Image: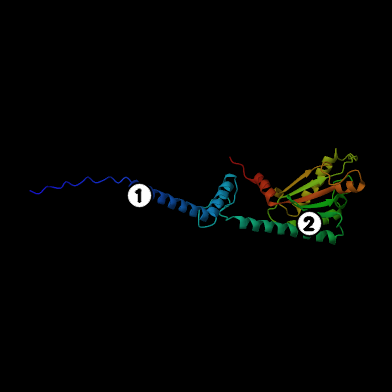
Amino acid sequence: MAQQHTPEPEKENSERWLLTYSDLITLLLIFFIILYTISKQDEAKFKQISESLSSALSGSKEVIGDSPGPHIIGQAGFKPQGDKTDKQEELAEKKKMQDIKQKVEELAKKEGLQTSISVTITERGVAIRIVDQVLFNSGYADLTPQADRILRGIGQILLTNKNQYIRIEGHTDNVPISNGRFASNWELSAARATKVLRLFVNIGFDPRLLSETGYGEYRPVADNKTELGKSKNRRVEIVILSTKFNQSESQSLEKPQH
């Protein structure tokens, strides 16, 4: 009888875990490659969405986003924005300010008032500065015939810009008022600014877009120790507010909630 051969027990493969480990490492590598690729492709979109959320949470009425993709819609409806659009709006506003400056300077030159009327562009907007001799008699707040003509000319230039807020500011030198009509330079400067505002309303400006204030002697642009400095400080400034300040003014026009 042949002797039966008993098979030897199979040896356990102690290195089988290496296959699982290798598969896990491969999957992790693929996962990180995919994450890296997505982050590179969506970096611009992520930035755009982040700006959209920030704009919405701050109460902006504009919309940021480019199709396709998610959009945040503000109170004013859909308006794509981004670096390119912001730049275009900034350039458009600068051009508008330069146009106003050029036209007012041309008017001043035509009237022979280049030294009495100046125009500067600041962060607040376009500031038209008119010395008081052009507009008022000393110590008074009634507009002269020349003032009426000059202000109407400036007003017609500014009326071409709809929905633009305008602030009218009166200033004096530091010499106390002594004619008994006004209690102080504050009252005089405010009364002069109001006269200019009323004229603007009469020629067609929306009263809701106008405001006036009197600063008296407390915001000089020159030294009150000299007569030349005093003459520069006695002035009215018409400020056409930039978009930044325009938006803050517009909040006061929102209808109250009941």
Asked whether the viewer can see residue 202, the reply is: yes
Would you call the spot at circle 2 few (<14 residues within 10 Å), some (14-19), or many (20 or more)?
A: some
Please identify the quadrant where the C terminus is shown: top right
Q: Is residue 189 left or right of residue 37?
A: right
Q: Position of residue 222 (x, y in %)?
A: 86, 46
Residue positioned most to the right: 227
Residue plotted at (39% across, 48% down): 24
Give the residue at mark 1.
19
* Residue positioned 49% across, 55% down in the render: 37
Q: Earlier in the sequence, mark 1 or mark 2?
A: 1
Residue 90 image point, x, y percent = 67, 56
- Residue 74 shows up from this direction: no
- Viewer-side residue, 113 vs 232: 232
Residue closer to the observer: 38 or 240: 38
Residue type at mark 1: give it: Leu
Is 194 displayed left or right of 90 in the figure? right
Q: Which amino acid, by three-letter code, is at mark 2?
A: Ile
In the rendered structure, the answer to whether residue 11 lies left or right of residue 87 reads left
